[in-house]
């Protein structure tokens, strides 16, 4: 497909080929296309395949980057933070406990307002050991000044490396970008992926420029001195403002992306599926969309008015957009592939965000919550149908005090 | 970075030839007699303006860089307590990639990272080890004042045996709470990283100019390099600030802190006690309040350990092996 960009009046190819890739492989090609300068690797399943693939891409000369095998996740994240401070586009990633091992470095990357991109191949936290997906790992950075989004297909994964760098590096934002994908269900499941051309990517993704904040002998600044009570509040306030500005930058990025690559995203923050006349919908993150959408189709065949909202961006949270979207329905079932023990509703993390988001509505939908799929347990189509049944029941009746249901757990 | 022009530093032979320019200047609030501040001043003076410094959390973070009063003329960035090695790697790798890809002009930029004994010798060891395995140009300076000096003077793995700290107070039942022998960091790193070409120990003020030249030598040798400095600390060691230089000298001359450099695996002693002799460790210990509670028996123990270091270790003062091990002939 050839496209003409109006303001440039020049024709260029947008796509070059189609490949069968899994989520990790797709991200590694996103990193290649973004011409990343520094990559820091440390092994942990399931994110680690992205680093396997990138090392081969570099060995084959398809990307010129420093590839550092770090001694720990903490070092891995500090390496990309510091590479980012001198103006290098940097990439790292992790999963589960590895992500938590480097947590201190993840926090300072945000408070230093540096924009490396991290892949989080979601994995259950130890103990006990489990390779499977749970979202608590990535969720841990949600209040730290991070951009955080979940993708559902390998194609989206590749494209969100590009969108992610663009948003993160924008001088109105400058926040680290967490690109989360479900361990195994996306990191290691294959999809047909269209590969953008280098030329098209260059049109979309500007050069990383830290400007006056770049650390270099020509710009001898001091970064992150001790401020104590004198200035911390003002600096936190700047993080807060950046997180709020990020929403507009995200919208712009998708508009530009659609302009170059075709109308791929109807909405930046979430995707609605068969919600037009729906009375009850479910909302969730990541690969849950697959069984949920199939369940929607089957229930629609039986005449049930159900739909699914696939939430993509978790930080910044699309409050206004979701309020408008979910406010249309009579009942919302929130699916959490995470836990928040001891929290106000004893439900999952997403539940609390959605409840908070919808609270100001005068005519709120009834909200119930499902905790499911923890540690990588399969969430089947039947599980989704059961969750839809419960959500449909909730649409007419009063929601009881206990509205959190564990799905797929041995009782 | 073979393709880059090298800054070929000259050896500083006399005080008069010490560069006049300061790159660590007013704006810090370190204590009177702070020898770690001397380390900061000297490494930046020796390296010059085409240098990026990173420093991990410690007294040389908290006392140096209060917001709006930075003493650093060269670019400087904070890094986390255990991240000295990683900060050097990230900075150096970022510069190398950007230069190789033509994104910034090619030139030699020194990357120097400093960390305290808590950050470098304990928490950050793994990261420093990782850094010393790379082929990047970087210098890591561990400034060792033998305690967590901005946090209340707590013992670290590098605190001298017997010392009083806020974690190791002498009490009615236990006179000595610091029962750990000082960790032998520089040789551990030298032994463990055969491709690291330069490891040294130093004292900012003794012998004169030695530390400045060791920094220059490390930068000239290139690749990942490491210097461990011995920094008397009036606050933590409990003595009058006027004695800082004297205590540094006594620490070296008593043999409790061996002074040497290892270039491409070859060790040379900066202060060789076998030639110049050793003063009793008592002369060093008894000038410091942190050892005031020690009795003769304790001092004899420390003296005995120091004697063993110099008289029995296969590589005196450096490597604690005593073996006569030989390969079997067949």
Image (tube, coloured by chain):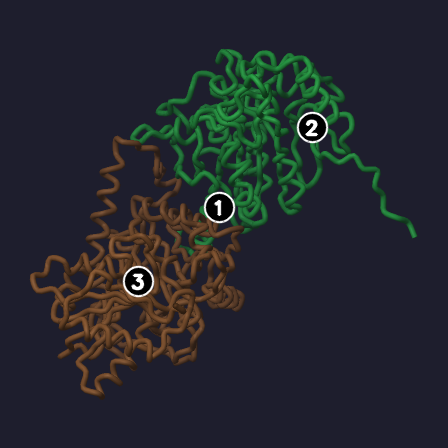
Outermost residue to the left: A362
- Left of A363 or right of it: where is A81? right
Looking at the rendered image, the disc whose residue lies closer to the viewer, 2 or 3, is: 3
- Residue A202 visible in the current orientation: no
Q: Secondary structure at mark 2?
A: strand
The disc label shown at residue B86, or none: 1
Residue at image position (34%, 70%) is A407
Looking at the rendered image, the disc whose residue lies closer to the viewer, 1 or 3, is: 3
Image: B329 above or below A4 = above
Q: Which residue is mark 2?
A: B269
| CA neighbours of label 1 inside 10 A, class few (<14), some (14 to 19), many (20+) | many
- Residues indicated by labels 2 and 3 sit on the same polypeptide chain: no
Q: Chain of mark 2?
A: B
Chain letter, green in picture: B
Shade representing chain A: brown
- Left of B62 or right of it: where is A41? right
Residue at image position (52%, 30%) is B143
Q: CA distance from mark 2 to mark 1?
A: 30 Å
Q: Chain of mark 1?
A: B
Question: How far from the left and from the top, in percent, is residue A59?
Answer: 54, 66
- Residue A22 visible in the current orientation: yes
Ranked by sequence position, the earlier of labels 2 and 1 is 1
- Residues indicated by labels 2 and 1 sit on the same polypeptide chain: yes
The disc label shown at residue B329, or none: none
Q: CA distance from mark 2 to mark 3?
A: 57 Å
Q: Secondary structure at mark 1?
A: helix
| CA neighbours of label 3 inside 10 A, class few (<14), some (14 to 19), many (20+) | many
Q: Quadrant of residue A250?
A: bottom left
Q: Which residue is mark 3?
A: A149
User: Which of the image's four quarters has the N terminus of chain A?
Assistant: bottom left
- Left of B69 or right of it: where is A375? right
Residue A373 vs residue B63, the one in the foreground: A373
């Amino acid at each position: 497909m050839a496209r003409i960009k109006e303001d440039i009046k020049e024709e260029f190819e947008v796509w070059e080929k189609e490949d069968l890739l899994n989520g990790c492989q797709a991200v590694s090609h996103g990193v290649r296309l973004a011409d990343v300068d520094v990559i820091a690797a440390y092994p942990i399943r399931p994110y680690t395949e992205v680093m396997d693939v990138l090392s081969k891409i570099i060995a084959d000369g398809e990307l010129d980057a420093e590839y550092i095998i770090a001694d720990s996740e903490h070092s891995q994240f500090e390496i990309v933070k510091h590479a980012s401070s001198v103006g290098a586009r940097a990439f790292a990633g992790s999963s589960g406990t590895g992500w938590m091992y480097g947590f201190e470095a993840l926090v300072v990357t945000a408070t230093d307002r540096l924009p490396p991109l991290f892949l989080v191949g979601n994995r259950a936290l130890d103990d006990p050991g489990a390779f499977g997906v749970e979202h608590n790992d990535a969720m841990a950075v949600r209040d730290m000044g991070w951009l955080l989004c979940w993708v559902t297909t390998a194609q989206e994964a590749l494209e969100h490396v590009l969108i992610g760098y663009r948003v993160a590096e924008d001088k109105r934002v400058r926040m680290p970008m967490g690109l989360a994908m479900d361990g195994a269900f996306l990191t290691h499941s294959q999809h047909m992926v269209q590969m953008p051309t280098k030329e098209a990517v260059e049109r979309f993704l500007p050069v990383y420029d830290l400007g006056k904040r770049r650390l270099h002998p020509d710009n001898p600044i001091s970064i992150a001195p001790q401020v104590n009570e004198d200035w911390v509040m003002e600096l936190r306030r700047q993080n807060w403002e950046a997180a709020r500005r990020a929403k507009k930058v995200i919208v712009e990025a998708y508009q530009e992306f659609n302009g170059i690559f075709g109308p791929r995203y109807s909405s930046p923050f979430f995707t609605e599926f068969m919600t037009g006349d729906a009375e009850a919908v479910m909302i969730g993150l990541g690969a849950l969309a697959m069984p949920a959408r199939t369940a929607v189709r089957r229930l629609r065949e039986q005449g049930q008015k159900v739909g699914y909202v696939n939430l993509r961006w978790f930080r910044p949270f699309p409050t206004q957009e979701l309020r408008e979207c979910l406010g249309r329905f009579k009942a919302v079932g929130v699916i959490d592939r995470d836990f928040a023990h001891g929290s106000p509703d004893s439900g999952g993390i997403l539940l609390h965000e959605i409840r908070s988001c919808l609270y100001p509505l005068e005519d709120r939908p009834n909200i119930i919550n499902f905790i499911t799929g923890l540690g990588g347990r399969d969430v089947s189509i039947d599980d989704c149908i059961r969750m839809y049944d419960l959500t449909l029941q909730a649409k007419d009746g009063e929601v009881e005090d206990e509205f959190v249901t564990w799905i797929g757990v041995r009782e | 970075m073979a393709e880059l022009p090298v800054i070929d530093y000259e050896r500083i032979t006399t005080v008069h030839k010490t560069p006049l320019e300061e790159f660590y200047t007013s704006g810090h609030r370190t204590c009177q007699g702070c020898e770690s501040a001397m380390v900061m001043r000297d490494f930046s003076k020796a390296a010059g303006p085409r240098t990026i410094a990173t420093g991990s959390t410690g007294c040389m973070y908290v006392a140096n860089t209060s917001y709006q009063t930075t003493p650093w003329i060269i670019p400087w960035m904070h890094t986390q307590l255990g991240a000295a090695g990683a900060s050097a790697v990230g900075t150096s790798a970022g510069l190398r990639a950007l230069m190789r890809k033509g994104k910034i002009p090619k030139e030699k930029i020194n990357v120097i990272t400093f960390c305290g004994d808590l950050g470098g010798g304990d928490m950050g060891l793994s990261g420093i080890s990782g850094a010393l395995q790379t082929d990047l140009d970087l210098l890591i300076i561990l400034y060792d004042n033998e305690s967590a000096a901005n946090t209340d003077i707590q013992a670290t793995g590098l605190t001298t045996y017997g010392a009083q700290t806020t974690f190791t107070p002498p009490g009615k039942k236990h006179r000595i709470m610091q029962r750990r022998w000082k960790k032998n960091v520089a040789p551990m790193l030298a032994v463990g990283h055969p491709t690291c070409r330069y490891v040294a120990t130093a004292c900012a003020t003794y012998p004169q100019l030695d530390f400045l030249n060791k920094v220059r030598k490390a930068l000239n040798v290139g690749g990942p390099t490491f210097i461990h400095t011995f920094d008397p600390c009036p606050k933590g060691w409990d003595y009058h600030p006027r004695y800082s230089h004297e205590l540094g000298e006594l620490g070296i001359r008593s043999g409790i802190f061996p002074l040497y450099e290892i270039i491409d695996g070859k060790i040379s002693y900066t202060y060789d006690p076998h030639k110049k002799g050793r003063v009793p460790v008592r002369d060093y210990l008894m000038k410091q309040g942190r050892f005031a509670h020690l009795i003769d028996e304790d001092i004899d123990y420390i003296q005995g350990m120091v004697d063993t270091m110099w008289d029995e270790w296969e590589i005196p003062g450096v490597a604690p092996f005593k073996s006569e091990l030989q390969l079997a002939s067949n």
